[in-house]
Image: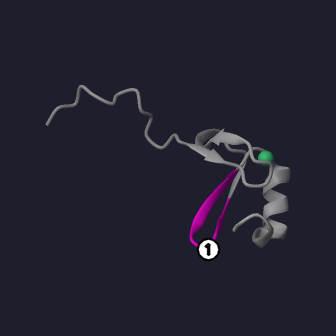
Amino acid sequence: MCCCSGTKTKETSQMVKDVVCGMQIDSNEAAGKSEYQGQTYYFCAPGCKRKFDANPQQFVK
Ligand SMILES: [Zn+2]
């Protein structure tokens, strides 16, 4: 096994879309997250999470 490649990839960091406002955010820097129908959604701000939690179907297609 070789361990000299891929060291710049951080463990769980990934770009995800905040479905409420459409922003691309880093999952490590998300202000909040919610699970809905087995999927995890990340949000840039607590306000986005609140909107999603109040009415998830509106944002999930
Ligand atoms: Zn947002």
Identify the secondary structure beneath mark 1: loop
Which residue corresponds to the image point at 34% horizontal and 28% vertical from the top-left? Answer: 7
Q: Nearer the viewer, residue 61 or 34?
A: 61
Q: Nearer the viewer, residue 21 or 61?
A: 61
Q: Nearer the viewer, residue 16 or 1?
A: 16
Main SS, magenta residues = strand
The quarter of the rendered structure image containing the N terminus is top left
Q: Quadrant of residue 41?
A: bottom right
Q: Is residue 21 above or below residue 6?
A: below
Which residue corresponds to the image point at 66% horizontal and 48% vertical from the top-left? Answer: 17
Q: Quadrant of residue 57?
A: bottom right
Which residue corresponds to the image point at 24% horizontal and 25% vertical from the top-left? Answer: 4
Residue indicated by mark 1: 37
The quarter of the rendered structure image containing the C terminus is bottom right
Q: Based on the picture, tell me whether residue 10 belongs to the magenta stretch.
A: no
Density class for disc 1 (Cα within 10 Å; few <14, some 14-19, many ≥20) is few
Q: Position of residue 44 (x, y in %)?
A: 75, 44
